Structures are given as structure tokens and as C-alpha cells.
Amino acid sequence: MKVLDLDASLLDEFSDSLWLEDGLSRNTLDSYRNDLRLFSHWLRIRKQDNVPVLTGATHSDLLEFLASRVSARIKASTTSRELSSLKRFYRFLLRQGRITSDPSLNIETPKLVRSLPESLTEEEVEKLLSMPDVKQPLGLRDRAMLEVLYATGLRVSELINLKYSQVSMDAGVLRVMGKGRKERLSPLGEESLSWLKRYTKEARPELLEDIVTDTIFVTMRGAAMTRQAFWYLIRRYALLVGVTKQLSPHTLRHAFATHLLNHGADLRVVQLLLGHSDISTTQIYTHIARERLKQIHAEHHPRG
């Protein structure tokens, strides 16, 4: 069997294992696969005639690979992710008995300075939510999507794939299957629930016509919206209200978390609502909330 075939076969087995154990999304599995393909390609070039498969990589090989990535000025966050992929892959091979020792042992993941996500003020969110023309079916759909996103803190992928079977209009909650197939409940709140009911009653039937689907938010063709289309939608509305910040598809998710903390929500509650498995991921929002408190203090305290 060729070296490339061996590597591809191992990556298939590894991806299947990740999917079965953690229920990871296709995008996450592709990310692991791409990182490992990159390392495999680097190994083949470096070794030239003496080409090892991934199972033949040594501790020194991993260190040299990571050093080459740093020398190429690859972002630290990318290098850290690549190392994480390698560590998980070699732990898998060790469990499978494909290798006798883990070459990724004692290679520390660099501590990253976590950048604060760009968020919106409450005033900016209000302007953004008011931009869609709710007299039009697509405008009413957009308003409902933005309201639900801001009210629940869903990931964009969770929003665009939302199904009727996940929503209880009577209870006013969503049942969401997040990363790692972990389920959580997200309260909708009166405002977003009102817009969601209005959209499903007035606009959705017009958009679907005779098409039958369980997906809640649909396009003119009756299909689910893509991440790219929703990202374009947010940018377009942001520009219309004069927001010039560097936004991302998760801008309203960031605003949701930040505004909850600004109004005194407990960090553990915000962690549950966001679906974070580790509270350290949620803690980044406390920095944003702290900066807001400093700003308020400086503006309103006589000795600020």
C-alpha cells in the first residue's frame, strides 16, 4: 500500500472515531484532517527518499514542524490548533496500538493572548434589529432571525438549521443541539417570540408556497439559508445603520453574552446559555463587561 493511501486510511479511521465519540461537525472534522494532511505533506518533503507515514513521526519531527510554522509567521492561534490536532491524533494511534509511544508528549501548547470579540452596544443592536423592512416577507424573516439570535445567543449554524421540532412556542424555549452533540435549552423571551410567531404566520407560508420543510428560516426558494448569506445580511444591515466595527457572524452572540453580564447575569448561567463546555471560554466576556464598567465609572464618577 502506498504511503499516501496509508495516511488517508488512518485519517479516515481517526475522523470516524471523533465523530462517534464526540459527534463533531463536518467542519471540525475537516479542520482536523487538513491539519494532519499538512503535517503528512511536510514530512514527505522533509524526508525525501526516506518517506515515513504519519505513524513514523518522532518527537523531533513534531518540534521541527511547529518551528517551521512559527518561522513562516503562521498565526499563533493556528499553530496552537495544529498542535492540538496532532496531540489528539497520536493519542488515538496509541490507543489503537498503532504506535508504542506518543511523539506529541511533553510538547506544551502555547498560551495565547485571547483577543476580545468585537461586540455592539445595546443602542447599536436596537438600530440593527430595526433595519429590516417587516412589511416584506424577507424583511420580516430577517427581523425574526436577528431577534432570535440576540435573544438566545445561538451560533449562526444553530440558527440557520433551526427546525420546528426544536421550538416550543407555548413554553417560549428552543432545544438546541450544540457542539459535541450537547443539548441545551435557550429561552426566547417575549420580544423574539413575538417576532418568530409573526414570521411563521405571515411571511414563511408566502416564502414556501407549496414547499414542505421543517426548517424555520427559509429563502425565497424554500431552502435553509447558508452561513455566508446570513453573514452578508448582517453586514448589509450594519452598514445601513452606520456601524463600521469589524463584525463577524457571531457578533450578536457576543452582544448577547456581554449585555447579560453587564446587567448582572451570573457567569455560569451565561456559560449554559452559550453552550460552552468550559467556563474559561465564557470568561473572555467578563473582560468586555469589565471594560464597560470602567467606561461608565470614568464618565459618571466625580473622580473618574
Image (cartoon, helix red, strand yellow):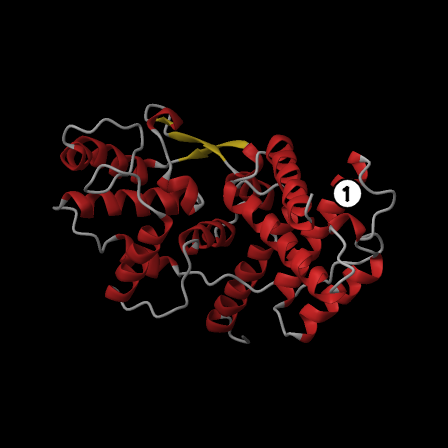
Residue 5, percent from left and from top = 64, 45
Residue 157 in sight from this viewpoint: yes
Q: Which residue is mark 1?
A: 91
Residue 190, percent from left and from top = 32, 36
- Classify mark 1: helix, strand or loop: helix
Q: Quadrant of the N terminus?
A: top right
> Quick one: label 1, few (<14), some, or many (20+) residues within 10 Å?
some
Q: Quadrant of the C terminus?
A: bottom right
Tell me where residue 115 sits by quadrant: bottom right
Q: Please state the total of marks drawn on the protein image.
A: 1
Residue 282 in sight from this viewpoint: no
Residue 65, percent from left and from top = 73, 64
Q: Amino acid at mark 1?
A: Arg
Relative vertical location of residue 278 with respect to residue 187 in this rendering, above or below: below
Residue visible at 19% across and 42% down in the picture: 220
Relative vertical location of residue 233 with respect to residue 210 in this rendering, above or below: below
Residue 251, percent from left and from top = 42, 56
Q: Is residue 2 left or right of residue 273?
A: right
Relative vertical location of residue 211 with respect to residue 30 in this rendering, above or below: above
Q: Is residue 217 left or right of residue 114?
A: left
